[in-house]
Image: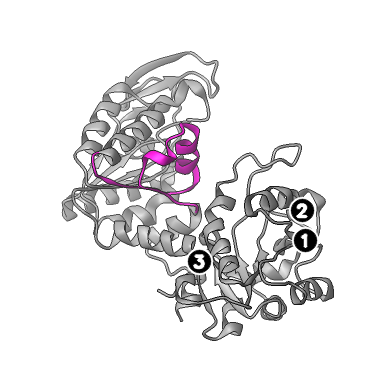
Amino acid sequence: MKTVDNINFADKKVLIRVDFNVPLNENFEISDDSRITAALPTINKILDDGGSVILMSHLGRPKDGPNPKYSLKHILQHLSKFLNTNVKFADDCVGDIALKLANNLKAGEVLLLENLRFYKEEEKGDLQFAEKLSKLGNYYVNDAFGTAHRAHASTAVIAQFFGEAKCFGYLMAKEIENAEKVMKNPARPFTAIIGGAKAGDKILILDNLMSVADNIIIGGGMSYTFVKAQGGKIGNSLVENDRLELTLQILSNAQKNGVKIHLPQDSVIADKFNNESNIKVAQSNEIPDGWMGLDIGPQAIENYKNIILQSKTILWNGPMGVFEMQNFENGTKQIALTLAEATNRGTFTLIGGGDSSAAIHKFKLEEKVSYVSTGGGALLEYFEGKILPGISAIND
């Protein structure tokens, strides 16, 4: 794998695709800067070599061209502070202004381009747009794992204009290395914890895990589709009736492959979907009408803890319940705390982006697990066995 370590960037202008799609509050202040901090080692390596850096990213989902709400200008001050330099800003990501600013960059200087998605050509993977971007630097580094599953102009199409002058950044390399550690050579027993709302979203990852996992723990709203498929009563819990046959097939495949699938024996149930509802605990297959499962129960927590603490490799993708509401966060919190304990005992724990990453940050445990991925959808597609365009563009 070719990374920034393989190149001396002295006097080079380096175009880096980063993932600065950070959450902003109503005052346009960054509420979670972990994606920016994750990119700093790559940026600093190039600056330390004596190169200059041009950063490109998207922010949010602007619909119809430029929108001040989604301007990367909002992160300029924060980024300048992190890099201890006055980061320059281009009001456009292509065109004369951007080109002039990039050409005038001196060694050690940094330029941030305006939001790539202000152009529809970015998401369309437009060749001419990619070529315009490529004119801004003489080396290309992809360090945006969070967008590696998108065949966009700045993540996949652009690489062809750089020949051999392209590589992965540290973050991208670390993401790939950790994902491969789980899927290609896991220490055993290997346990995958799969949660979230819908079974349909996780069908492909469950299929792919059949050939590698020893245990699959299931939690969250998706578990009730499995429970109902086996004849359980789930009240008003979330269910995908069109996936019942498919979940039975997954259970059958697991049995054939010697993979143990663990469903929550009990659930914390509520009579309404809000934090102020009435709450009680019930067996997951005996939830009364008018009630819904919103978290795993105490029996399930104990069972899942035991499995986790006996595992040597763990992948966690998806929460155990509606952890955004305080009354239904305990299952997710206990799993997170147990993962920290397992990590301390020597287990390799990979937290698979998205809601799992949000949960780990919420409970302030990001330093207590082995690795927290910055890519939700990208990591999911990697575990589904798909080829990620942002990775193959560098490797090809």
**Residue 18, numbered circle:** none
The earlier-in-sequence mark between 1 and 3 is: 1
In x, y percent, where is residue 31? 63, 39
- Mark 1 or mark 2: name the one nearer the start of the chain: 2
Q: Which amino acid does label 3 sit on?
A: Gly
CB-based contact (under 8 Å), mark 1 and mark 2: yes
Q: In this view, does 285 lie above or below 368?
A: above
* The image quarter in which residue 122 lies: bottom right
Q: Name the residue under label 2.
A: 73
- 251 inside magenta stretch: no
Query: In terms of secondary structure, where does tag 3 sit?
Result: loop
- Looking at the image, residue 190 sits to the left or right of residue 237; the answer is left
**Which residue was labeled with disc 3?**
169
Residue depicted at x 56% and y 71%: 49
User: How many angstroms separate mark 2 from mark 3 (CA)?
Assistant: 23 Å
Task: Tell us which disc is closer to us: 1 or 2.
Answer: 1
